[in-house]
């Protein structure tokens, strides 16, 4: 079974998680649950239900939303097993990956929280 969510793809979140992410500790069901949580967060924080309009949103807008959700899932995946799939990921590498993902999420969230951006999205 593949992970199912609206706003990102399996390829995107696995790319964000990077090599040696804990695939066996983070099965598709976990990715689905994490993706749905990330989607709920972005909808609530932005006070806009992107889930209902995602398929018809402008492609530029979709990539910002997808980036947020993919990073959210990747962080959850890395948190399942901070040492990576083979147990060789060090603490500093793990923390660096989380920090890069968090910063990317915050950048996307900052863009999407701006109500002028939401207006632009809805009119694009």
Image (cartoon, helix red, strand yellow):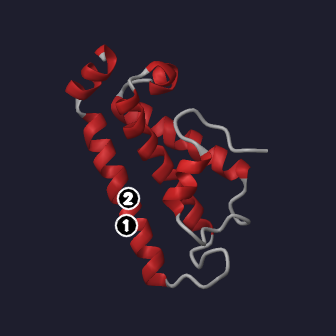
Q: Position of residue 51 (x, y in %)?
A: 51, 26
- Residue at image coords 51%, 22%: 55
- Residue at image coords 57%, 75%: 82
75 left or right of 107 in image: right
Q: Name the secondary structure under disc 1.
A: helix
Total marks in image: 2
The answer to whether one can see residue 75 in this image is: no
Dot 2: within a 10 Å radius of its alpha carbon, few (fewer than 14), some, or many (20 or more) residues?
Answer: some
Judging depth in this view, the residue of 20 and 79 nearest the camera is 20
Residue 67 falls in which quadrant of the image? top left
Q: Is residue 71 above or below residue 83?
A: above
In the current view of this chain or complex, which residue is farthest to the left? 116
40 left or right of 77 in image: left
- The mark found on residue 102 in the picture is 2
Q: Name the secondary structure under disc 2.
A: helix
- Residue at image coords 32%, 58%: 103
97 left or right of 107 in image: right
Quadrant (top left/top right/bottom left/bottom right) for the C terminus: top left
Quadrant (top left/top right/bottom left/bottom right) for the N terminus: top right
99 left or right of 74 in image: left
Q: Position of residue 80 (x, y in %)?
A: 62, 66
Q: Position of residue 86 (x, y in %)?
A: 67, 80
Q: Is residue 78 above or below residue 89?
A: above
Which residue is denoted by mark 1 in the rendering?
99
Q: Position of residue 8 (x, y in %)?
A: 53, 40
The answer to whether one can see residue 25 in this image is: yes
Q: Is residue 3 above or below residue 95?
A: above
In the current view of this chain or complex, which residue is farthest to the top? 123
- Residue at image coords 43%, 74%: 95
Q: Are marks 1 and 2 in contact (CB under 8 Å)?
A: yes
Dot 1: within a 10 Å radius of its alpha carbon, few (fewer than 14), some, or many (20 or more) residues?
Answer: few
Between the residue at mark 1 and the residue at mark 2, the CA separation in whole angstroms equals 5 Å
């Amino acid at each position: 079974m593949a992970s199912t969510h609206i706003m990102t793809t399996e390829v995107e979140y696995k790319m964000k998680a990077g090599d040696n992410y804990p695939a066996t500790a983070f099965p598709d069901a976990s990715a689905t649950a994490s993706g749905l949580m990330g989607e709920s967060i972005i909808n609530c924080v932005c006070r806009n239900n992107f889930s209902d309009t995602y398929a018809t949103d402008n492609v530029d807008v979709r990539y910002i939303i997808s980036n947020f959700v993919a990073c959210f899932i990747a962080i959850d995946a890395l948190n399942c097993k901070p040492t990576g799939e083979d147990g060789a990921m060090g603490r500093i590498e793990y923390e660096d990956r989380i920090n890069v993902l968090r910063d990317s999420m915050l950048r996307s969230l900052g863009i999407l929280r701006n109500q002028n951006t939401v207006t632009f999205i809805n009119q694009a």
